[in-house]
Image: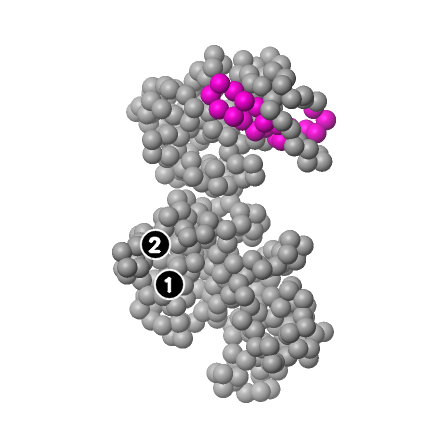
Amino acid sequence: MAQIRVENLRKEFSGFTAVQNSSFIVEDGDFFVMLGPSGCGKTTTLRMIAGLELPTSGRILLGGEDVTMKRARERDIAFVFQLFALYPHMNVRKNIGFPLLAQGTPRSEIRARVDEVAKLLRIDHILEKPVSGLAGGDRQRVALGRAIVRRPMCFLMDEPLGTLDAEFRDLMVHELRELHNRIGATTVYVTHDQLEAMSMADKIAVMNHGIIEQFGSPREIYDRPRTMYVADFMGSPPMNFLNFHSGLARGSESVSVRGADIVVPRINEDRAPADLALGIRPEHIRLDDGAKLRGEVLGAEYLGTTQIVVVETGEGRLKARIPASDHVTVGENVGLALNSPHLSLFDKSTGRAIETALYEGGAHG
């Protein structure tokens, strides 16, 4: 396995820029996820790492070797596609062993390595079955087996769970992470599903319009988003935003929103922009009769142990995740208390997060 280093990677198609000067490092053995909506540039980036597309500019290093202009066959990688790409006329054993056969590996070694991989993936009992009759989850395991059997430097996966139903997808998310832990493979995984990313990744790159908006651990990206786009994309429901006008200066620790004094993290910038958005996750809001920030309940969504309550305030609509046992009625006027250590501040004109004390130490740049 090996480190993957991407430096100022750019890709243009007839005047359209699909990837804009992306830079990141996937450390040896990491499970790295590229996350974003369709058309954001994540699959194009993956295809450039694989050698299926050549970049307009920038560099790609695999295990310290510059492979930027090398074709896919010259890179020691294995690619797992969304649509599996299995050979329907072959059984499971022959599908998994085909890459080794193409490389001229002795048949005895092929058989031993296929048996090893099949046992790892828990499909050794179906090795002699045709792939055409397999369920989606088993077909996905066969596709993974065909990649693993080669023992490449890294694995590249392009939305490999996208065609599975919800039950199989949840199962495979769990199994993919367990598999990664067992074999320690450097993996680059593309998805538009934030739950997949949060469940599996060591590091995540959130992409938007060809730009990496934020790179970091799942916790960093969820708790301390660097842009309003990341804050809104991550989470279900996403982060709430309250709008307000203020000339916060360095060291400020309080803002006034609709008559409510809200404690915020200490500002580390000389002066924050006037038009700001205060961001907070639904789980960090609670109902409080004594709170000055108030609003009207528009509805509630029951989720079993919790409920999502929608409240309209004068500065924006908030969603709060509260215990299911809390009783609220539509039209009721309620007070809202915000958990100050979990607040974020954003410049509304640029969408970037304001530098505060909680972002010190490189967690927020």
The residue that label 2 is drawn on is 19
* Pick the front one: 103 or 296: 296
User: Dots 1 and 2: beta carbons under 8 Å?
Assistant: yes
Q: Position of residue 210 (x, y in %)?
A: 36, 50
Residue drawn at the location 51% of the way across and 33% of the way down: 239
Name the spot of residue 269 as percent of width and height, x first. 33, 27
At label 1, the amino acid type is Met
Q: Is residue 325 magenta?
A: yes
Helix, strand or loop at mark 2: strand
Residue 42 screen position, x and y as percent? 42, 55
Answer left or right for 216 relative to 82: left
- The answer to whether residue 258 is left or right of residue 126 is left
**Label placed on residue 48:** 1
Quadrant of residue 138 in the image?
bottom right
Highlighted range, magenta: 308-326
Compared to residue 206, the image places residue 1 above or below, namely below
